[in-house]
Image: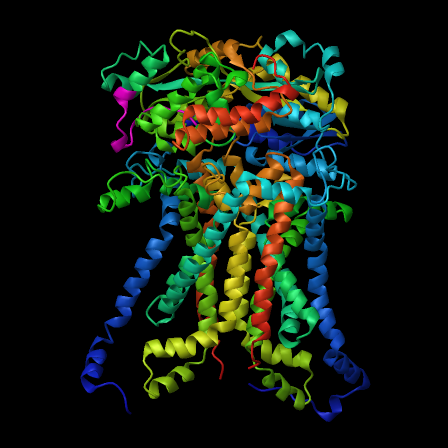
Amino acid sequence: MKRRTFCTLATAGSASLALGARPARAATTVSLWHIFGYSTEPGLINIARFNASRSDLQIDGKSIPFGQLSQQLVKGVATGDVPDLITIDNPTVASFASQGVLEEVGARVAASRILAKDRFFPGSWATTISQGKQFAVPGEVNTLLFYVNQDLLRAGGLDPAKPPQTWAELTAVAAKLADPAKGKYGVGVSAIQTEEGTFQWLPFLQQSGASLKTLTSPDAAAALQLWVDWVQKGYASHDILVKRQSEMTDAWLAGNTAMSLSGPWELPRILRDVKFAWTVMPMPVREGRNIHATALGGYVWAIPKGARNIDAAFQVIEYMLAPEQAARSFAGGRLPAVQDVQPPTDLPRAEVYAAFEGQLQYARPRGPSPEWPRISEALQRAIQQAVTGQQSAQQALATASATIAPLLQRYPIEGM
Amino acid sequence: MSGPAPARDAMRRALVPLRPWLLTLGGVAIAAVYLFPVYWMVISSLKANPELFAAVPTLYPHAPTLAAFRWIFERENVGLYLQNSAIISFSVTALTLVLATGAAYALARTRTFWTAAMVVAIMAVQVLPPPLLVTPMFVIFRQIGLVNTQFAVILATTTKVLPFAIIMLRTSFAQIPVELEEAARVDGCPRFIAFFRITLPLARTGYIVVSSLVFLLAYGEFVYPLSLMNRKELQPGPVGLYSFVGADFADWSDALAFATVFVAPVIVLYMFLQRRIVSGLTAGALK
Amino acid sequence: MSISLRRPTDTTPWRMSRDRFLDSPTIWALLIGAAALFLLLLVGYPIAYNLVMSVQEVTLGNLPSFSRPWVGLENYRQLLADPLFLLVAKNTLIFTIANVAVQFVLGLGLALYFQLSFPASSFLRGLVLVGWMLPPLVIGAVWKWLLGSDSGFVNYALQGLGLISGKIYWLSDPSLSLLAVTIANIWFGAPFNMILLAAGLAGIPADIYEAAALDGAGPVRRFVWITLPLLRPTIYALLSLSTVYTMRAFDLIYTMTHGGPLDSSNIFPVWSYRMSFELFDFGGGAAIATAMFALVLVVALAYVRSVNAERPM
């Protein structure tokens, strides 16, 4: 799509921001630390609209780069300078909650009409609960689909209307289209040693029929070996070890990767920059297993312990999740966490948004577990060990399992 | 004059007019190689996103576009970021020079256990990167009610550069013979005044180097402004850069356009001051 | 240079006591004291804070208060027992030595070269400093692209020149990632070396060289026997500073490789950060920071010895 959509969105946003950024009267101010950095973020527009529509309550938003969020929150907790409201990545809720850093919101949520449990995607709801208590409210979600360069498929003699349905087919297509010497690859995933790597590989583990409890099984090994083979045979770039999902999409946009796994957040810039025919396809299943599983990402609204304006913060949450605000997510490449909002049909490539929405039924949360950072780190390590060839897939997963098993015993995770 | 053989001499003399220009060529080559990453940054800001990641990297933008530059000016108040950066950087430089001068001079002229201990402490203290120091620093600033002010950022950034300034100026001062000041004292001029009249001018080179580097270090500082200030309108450039790097992706042509605009004023400033800096550096020779 | 002489009529009682004050040790104490106090408050406190955290068991829960469970040297013990410790220590050692040495040699070479008088020499020298103006995020990103295996310019150029046949996985090969971040950091640090050495070189009087040339000393001899000894204070300061700054290099590595893959480019500052802010093991992170401080004290002590050995000129 053209810049114009952006421009309209952004100028509307910044104009209202200019209007509403500083409270004119002595209203209650809700301090909000958020991750909405980029101009197309619907969150920024919602904040501006809120400030313009209310005189008794104003949001004082501070945009924090995602990579700094943890550090800033820690600093806030350490110094008692916490905001009233914060957006945090959904798998981190349990670990923050277990350390007493978040306010419990269960009672308020139960009393709220807007935040009724059945409005939300179950997976997303599950991430907000830790040890039976609720500590956050889902904000926006995302999931994974393969972005497919149809021109490359056609050039390789393949029919773009018949996407690969199984792992074997996917690998075959990737093999056909890859030409590593020229920097062209068939498939792209992110195996980086951060939460993003876990986010991308976990669905493969789940689709193989294994789980965190059965990491030493041949199924789990097959899920990891899939990635190992892709890199070693040159179907995927060696650099997947250090590239974030968005960086893999960069390569896809440049026409260097035929099929790249990523989420809806890429849509605004894809629509703006893409120069070839493209579509999306769901993650292929493992032959013989037919298990549909995909990732569940996104952020949640949480109120840190020690926040001063809890009731006001809660009102902000309710505002953000009202249907009108939630519907704005799509244009910004986000999916609302509530199920009762549909993507506007006048959106460019509306069918892609619908495809993402459709995947949410298969999306599985990571955790919740207070030990998720350590579990994730063990998985990341295993992925890297295997893909770099330093260990075989079985060995790597065995090492990971040794770390993860005791963590699972202490805090069992339902469904993992 | 005894010296090299006449033939060698003659050859040298013949090459003399050519030599400076050859060296300039060499200098340009060195600067070009060295600045290549910066060049890459600038041309990348002129490329559309997909071209940035083309399989065959392009040395110049094939379809140059100023869209990114237009975009950043539309979307963000770039001028405000630059202004804040300038305020913070100049203030840090001034404060650092003021604090460092006295300490460096004292450390250069006296030698006791305590001064040695202080040099050790100053040197060692620099090893801790700002992210590890920022939390306790925040506590301090909150106690004195300075959170959310540029003043706090100025103070915090000064702590990062002050040790360097003290050590470098100390070295400069130590190279100025005490005899010059003693001579002034004999003539009835107190040390303090002698310092301003004699020592300081002779340490010009050191000051030029220290102030340029301190300024540049302060200009690029990111952690302290982000952690100590909440209000967007107070933030300097590096923090503004992050509004182009979102949670899930980064729009690199925009981010690089912003970075280009961010460093451009400093380069321009340098070009203007270049003459004075040159004369300062070459006048350092003692007579 | 003229010195203003005091005339007898200028000496009022106030002026005389002021001058006595200006000459007394008190003023020394004040001069150093101002800076010392400043640093003590704003840096000393954070160091003490880290030190205290390193001997406690710290979690997000008890982070705000200072009375946390005392664990003595347990954090340090766990650190040494951590399988990553040796790897990170080795990486830090290699990274530091390579950076300091190569940056120094490169900086010296550049300083000597630009010291020669030719048109635009000082302008070009200043241009080399431009890299310092960029925020680390940008430097890390640009180098990450230049060193990308697929569309990175470095591979492209090397292949074009026929120097390599396949791709080099600069950032994604565990055996090369440390080299990659070292190269980027050397690029970043060499101008700093250059400018300090240039300033030092400028402080050497030209007559000394002339006298030596008259005595028949060639350029190499002049360099070894005049330049280097006179540069000694600058060199010691530079090497010490360079070591300390290299040991705290964080932004560049974090942006380029995050310490990976598999901690192959992980050095102490990066490890400390990840431990505190990704694993929330604050005691461990603080222990690493305190250990870094202790290591650097060695460097600082060496520097002070070199300072004390300076003959007053």
Q: Farthest left residue?
A: B7
Which percent across, then down, holds residue C102?
41, 58
A59 lies above or below A207: below
Q: Who's the residue at 57% across and 82% down the image?
A: B177
Which percent across, then down, holds residue B284?
48, 76
Residue A320 in view (yes/no): no
Q: Nearer the viewer, residue B145 or A196?
A: A196
Q: Is residue C67 magenta?
A: no
Residue C37 in which image quadrant = bottom right
Which percent across, then down, holds residue A39?
52, 30
Q: Nearer the viewer, residue A142 or C180?
A: C180
On the picture, is B17 further left or further right than C137?
A: left
Q: Is residue A187 magenta?
A: yes
Which percent across, then down, holds residue B175?
54, 77
Per the rendered image, the range of residues in magenta is A175-190
B246 lies above or below A173: below
C264 lies above or below C94: above
